[in-house]
Amino acid sequence: MYSVEFDRPATLEAALAGLKAEDAQALSGGQTLIPTLKQRLAQPSKLVSLTAIPSLQGICVADDGMLCIGATTTHATVAAEAGAHYPALARLAAQIGDPAVRNRGTIGGSLANNDPSACYPAAVLASGALIRTNARDIAADDYFEGMFATALQEGEIITEIRFPIPEAAAYMKFAQPASRFALVGVFVAKTAGGVRVAVTGASEEGVFRWGAAEEALSADFSAGAIAGLSLPADDMIDDLHGTPDYRAHLVKVMTGRAVSAAQ
Amino acid sequence: MPKDHGIGAPSKRREDVRFLTGQGRYTDDINLHGQAHAVFVRSQVAHGRLNGLDTTAAAAMPGVIRVFTGADFAGVGGLPCGWQVTDRHGQPMQEPAHPVLAQGKVRHVGDPIAVVVAETLEQARDAAEAVEVDVEELEPVLDMKAALSDGAPLVHDDLTSNLCYDWGFVEENREAVNAAFEKAHHVTKLELVNQRLVPNAMEPRVAVGDYNTGTGDSTLYTTSQNPHVIRLLMGAFVLGIPEHKLRVVAPDVGGGFGSKIFHYAEEAFCTFAAKALRRPVKWTCTRSESFITDAHGRDHVTRIELALDAEGNFQAIRTETHANMGAYLSTFAPSVPTWLHGTLMAGNYKTPLIYVNVKAVFTNTVPVDAYRGAGRPEATYQLERLIDKAARELGMDPIEIRRRNFITEFPYATPVAVEYDTGDYNATLDKLIEIADLAGFDARLAESKARGRLRGLGINCYIEACGIAPSHLVGQLGARAGLYESATVRVNATGGLVVMTGSHSHGQGHETSFAQVVADMIGIDENMVEIVHGDTANTPMGMGTYGSRSLAVGGSAMVRATEKIIAKAKKIAAHLMEASPEDIELKDGAFTVAGTDRSVAWGDVTLAAYVPHNYPLEELEPGLEETAFYDPNNFTYPAGAYACEVEVDPETGKVTVERFAAADDFGNIVNPMIVDGQVHGGIAQGIGQALLERAVYDEYGQLLSGSYMDYAMPRADDMPFFTVDHSCQTPCTHNPLGVKGCGEAGAIGSPPAVANAVVDALQRAGHASVTHIDMPLTPARVWAAMQG
Ligand SMILES: Cc1cc2nc3c(=O)[nH]c(=O)nc-3n(C[C@H](O)[C@H](O)[C@H](O)COP(=O)(O)OP(=O)(O)OC[C@H]3O[C@@H](n4cnc5c(N)ncnc54)[C@H](O)[C@@H]3O)c2cc1C
């Protein structure tokens, strides 16, 4: 790690001010950023920790029925506390990494990072959640812009994620054998407005919605409904853990399993 | 009733008290006054010509003491290879130089080019980034077969090709073997890859060099399995330091699995730099660095054939293996695909004719050397996969075809130059059938099927050659070292004793099991025995720990030294009781005159030895300390039978190991709990190889699986509960303890069991064309195999 200045403000305003410094970077759970720094793959001038800001923490249900999760809420807290409102989301959080990662890593950090194999992006996109930042609300459909790319501007901080709670939902993750991130993860959410299917781990373009499956499942919410579909392998990731064909196949299998689990 | 102490007792591992309470003292825990820190600048390309190196900027950075380059090592010897293989034509292998720091060329990603030594580790890191390396990239040599083709770029410009050796074994059998294939009733063929593995010891390598300006003595603290070997190799061949001026200390070591046998550049560097700078120099490997510098394991590509008669009797075996040496010859690399592999190709079977051909190849990859099992897992995997395939082709039961071909009479001289002293392969197979509950398999198969899972059963046998090794024999085979072991037993006046052993424990529990042996021989409490190892300053010259040799060879030396102690102690006791030494019996720590009730305690005798007031000084020296060296006259041959049951998810190809059973014959057992643990660890490593682990290079020679994000290590939840048994015991006939060694068996015996089980599962599910899937049997590979 290169030496770096460290700041841990207690208010959002102070954090935003701190992030104005050249090459300053937000730090949340550090489960992605700290390993990157230790490998000397990044050299921020200053780290602004968000974890001492009370308004960014915790889980509640808003008057409009949305499940609101503060950006610095850890995976472990989501796993333990979101279950009463949104069981599929809690189960997803419980499958991220190991206990140490879950006790430090946060939902905001995961979404800001937008790793193409991360789990939360699938939940956010399938749920049609809102990403609330210090400046605006961003709809999930507008937020994810490809591998490690998001709609966030320089210095913009995610403050909260607001999930509409679906009628039924489930996440199915097929773990990459080494990292145990998603080799393919599929989140299926059945809402009043139709079924949404979001896929992580599979595509060169990052998390995406599988339109054909959504259409078929909106008409008939059963695993059999997607039997006749096949996902083109063109944009799928090719690496030592799986070919594009294999990933495309897994998307279908995991979608079917998620639908069955959501029944 | 299991024993509660001494040989055969499951004594708790005494060393675990310090390991589990954070009080182990590992090399990285050693910080010497005034120490400086070394960071290596390493090649980022697989193959390149070093056109220039500019260290000016780095040298001027804060805290930098000196930047070393290859030029500093121009007058220093290279890292030696400890084994010379002679090829099919009677010629010595091609043996390239292995410089401490690159000279003119870099040959793999990770090859050391320069070293920055600075006051702090962070300063050394900063400056290492400022060293400017001018490398002209050359086409890398990666695929072994392409490496041998005409016009392939040369890894070493001064060699005639990338072929290290073309070895034939036994060369005289070549024609007879070919003839047997000509007239065989049936020939089964298999091509397979035994993939490259990264050892991944929990503790990365560390070296701390120190130089005493007052005495002119050098000391190296290092993560080694064999400190005396390092002292000899580094002192005599690299740095020119006589052994009496060089001390090598390997304190607590957190796992080795072979990777810490070898002499590495970083050890020589720290010792050299400490003297040059007149201050201690420390280097601690990062995990990323260990992926590209620790010697890798396996990496064989093999074609194997088995000739059978109509009844399924094995007639002949023929193999051709390409073995990757990597960019340089690591310390024992040439011996692994030859003498540790070819000699095991008979397995547990009486095949009369065997011919093994091995082509060892240089490539622009990390050097490959011994890794848990070393050559023997490769031999076992080939043979046991092949036998399974043959059984299927002939419609025979996989157990029946093995039994039919078992060696049943001992000693048995194989056609591949070794003589098995003893064994009972039917006994371990019978035991396996019982403990694996093979009778219940059909019910479990039906139950899996009801859940939509494919179940498969894999069986195999294994044999290995351990207790390495008879020096006269390995000398003929090209070893440049002897492979005896040593022990000094030092009895103290008050009766406690210390055993100084040349073996080295890095997780095996020697401090417990060795103490059990000596305590049992004398009849005293285990806690009166202390085991000391790992420091050339206070242990006799020993060859260290690998090849499951510690108890069989090191333990035998300890027994011999203890026998000398007992013989002398009896003379002292005889004097004290005014009896004849021949009439003295030692039992439960007391010396008795046979047939009388006259006795003296162990402590009376030890006290007399050091306070010799009433003592036969004319005939006997005072004191009670003896040393013995033991050189085995044969290898030991642990053997056994393993069974694995897997489930395959037919939609995803994911394999889960549901049951695993191991029936081993390790001869006599000193500590059954430690043996269980060794087998558990070995099986876990074997399952890791079978299902998860794989070092992968891309076409540029970059290691794609260079971190735990992509290199899949086995974890607890990848494992079933193991059923292990070592009640079948045919004691070794030629060492005093009758022990055979258990450290590698699990890793040798388990990969074929897993692979056989997966193929069985797919076959049962109607995938008739799937006769083999290469390891690791990842979900993606198994799924692809099912697609046909
Ligand atoms: C061993 C291991 C296993 C893992 N397994 C999984 C897995 O199975 N599935 C999975 O999804 N993830 C996994 N992860 C990743 C983990 O979930 C991380 O916690 C997460 O990706 C990042 O969250 P963080 O809070 O740690 O963010 P940090 O590392 O602190 O930050 C990550 C990035 O986000 C930025 N950032 C952080 N918070 C904000 C914010 N509020 N607003 C704007 N930018 C912000 C930072 O500047 C940085 O660029 C694993 C990680 C590890 C180490």
Image (cartoon, coloured by chain):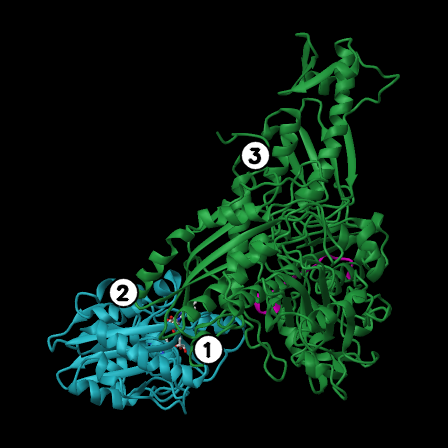
Chain colours: A cyan, B green
Query: Label 2 crowding class (10 Å Cα cut-off): few <14, some 14-19, many 20+?
Result: many
Q: Which mark is residue B785?
A: 1
**Tag 2: residue type?**
Ala
Q: CA distance from mark 2 to mark 1?
A: 37 Å
Which residue is label 3 attached to? B8
Farthest right residue?
A: B618
Q: Nearest the camera: B772 or B237?
A: B772
x and y percent of residue A21 in the render?
Answer: 43, 81
Q: Is residue B546 visible?
A: yes
**Tag 1: residue type?**
Ala
Which residue is label 2 attached to? A79
Q: Which mark is residue A73?
A: none
Which residue: 10% across, 75% down? A63
Q: Secondary structure at mark 1?
A: helix
Residue range of the region highlighted in magenta in the rendering: B277-289
Q: Kindly check if marks 3 and 1 are in contact, taking CB atoms under 8 A apart as contact.
A: no
B733 relative to B788 in the view: left or right: right
